[in-house]
Amino acid sequence: MTEETWHEARLIPTSGINGAEEQERRATSALLAVMTAVREFGRALTKPFGAPAGNVETYIEVPFVLGEKKLFPDGLVRVSRGQKTWTALVEVKTGSNELAAEQLENYLDIARDHGFDAVLTISNEIPAVPGQHPAKVDKRKLRKVAIHHLSWTSVLTEAVMQKEFRGIADPDQAWILGELIRYLEHPRSGALEFDDMGESWVATRNAVAAGTLRPTDKGVSEVANRFDALLRFASLRLGRQLGTEVTPVLSRRELAEPALRSQWLIDHLAEHATLTGAIRIPDTVGELVVTADLRAGRITCHVDVDAPREGRQTTRVNWLVRQLRTAPADLRIEAFVLHGRGAGSAELLATVRDDPGVLVADPAKDLRSFRVAQSLPMGGKRGRGRGSFIDSVLAVVDTFYGEVVQHLKAWSAAPPRLRPEPEPEAADRRPEVPAALVSTSLSSQDGAEAVASVVAAADPDPMPEDVAAAD
């Protein structure tokens, strides 16, 4: 037997997983154990929920009594520093299993009775809005105990970010975290990626194509929420590759009232047949906007770039084109003028490269900004794989960022330059003046002869040293 057929021993093996219960138990134990072993990772997961920077203790299947029932939450996390302690019950779901509101409400009661701070849930469900919980629990039970949620995608993203980009001080701990990453990336772990647009996707897509969709139709809100969840998943996925925090763009009001964002998406889908959202990537020229046109079957990504504030109009266009020298020729470039309304001049990048003036409709008007857009075919299937909507969105986001956005830089004015000082030789050199233009005024007589005449006029009988000084 050759070594190529040998299987390397793993700290957290994926073999021997039989059923959802075993899958959840192993995922829970692996995650909580690594949170204890790798301090930086445990801190990264618990800090956003208010836990102190202290020692992390974790337990699995801790028994509690609630009334006449004996309940076993999947885990418990306790973080202690000095006299301060933060404790949370943990409930874990893997695969397609969803969190049950009744079970979570029981755990909230247990946490309240024991003075715990929170209930933390982990599943493959990705809420449409950050901070929103996928399960609808009685809000009265949240007066003294908080409820938090992590998707397995966000856990995996945090693990990769900590190991590959932020760093782990201890090499052995870095290896342990790498084993957790390897385990969560395995299909048998149950830590799935976003893989379904929901049961209402096909019916909604068909209604849009037929032009019969109404905002009140059944399932439209589910599609809207799933689209926002897909944008969050795309953000986490891209952030994991870039090593930075990529987030969906939401207003403060939408974060406070998620129903506003959902209703806007529903109305926009019914009226324009499009689903639109944006993601923010640190240190880029602008937000990456994703628009899915369900009627046309196209997905478009675009980014807006401020034009330079100086130079000729074609010079400003060339400034953008130079940054897109490796971009696809079928990009659409749109130019907007200052104080202008409506659509601007638009043309494909291939044409703009040959003639930058095609974007200048009126040379007398200053260009304000550019819009760079890329459009690709949209998949229609609700799941994952070839021809699916999810994969087509992820592919367009990755392609547009890699070929366009990461190469764009914002314009900045050049700093003012100091005027060069004249050289001494040039300063002492005086041009020859024609005799007819020589002034007889004493103020213009700055030569040695003029100085001598001034001295003689002031003193009719000068001393020898005065004459010598004048000479």
Image: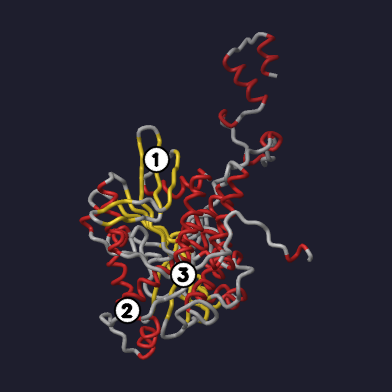
Q: Are marks 3 and 1 in contact (CB under 8 Å)?
A: no
Residue 456 horizontal/vertical position (percent): 62, 16
Residue 236 horizontal/vertical position (percent): 48, 61
Residue 37 horizontal/vertical position (percent): 53, 45
Q: Earlier in the sequence, mark 3 or mark 2?
A: 3
Circle 3 — which element?
A: loop
Give the side of residue 408 with respect to residue 345, left or right.
right
User: Residue under circle 3?
Assistant: 194
Circle 1 — which element?
A: loop
Q: How is the image coloured?
A: secondary structure
User: Residue under circle 1?
Assistant: 52
| Residue 285 shows in this picture | yes
Against 425, residue 320 (above or below) is below
Q: Residues within 10 Å of mark 1 (few under 14, many from 20)?
A: some
Judging depth in this view, the residue of 53 and 279 nearest the camera is 53
Q: Amino acid at mark 2?
A: Val
Residue 387 horizontal/vertical position (percent): 52, 82
Residue depicted at x 68% and y 10%: 465
Q: Earlier in the sequence, mark 3 or mark 1?
A: 1
Circle 2 — which element?
A: helix
Against 460, residue 306 (above or below) is below
Q: Residues within 10 Å of mark 3 (few under 14, many from 20)?
A: many
Q: Amino acid at mark 1?
A: Pro
- Residue at mark 2 to residue at mark 1: CA–CA distance: 42 Å
Residue depicted at x 39% and y 40%: 52
- Residue at mark 3 to residue at mark 1: CA–CA distance: 31 Å
Q: Amino acid at mark 3?
A: Phe
Residue depicted at x 40% and y 35%: 81
- Residue at mark 3 to residue at mark 2: CA–CA distance: 19 Å
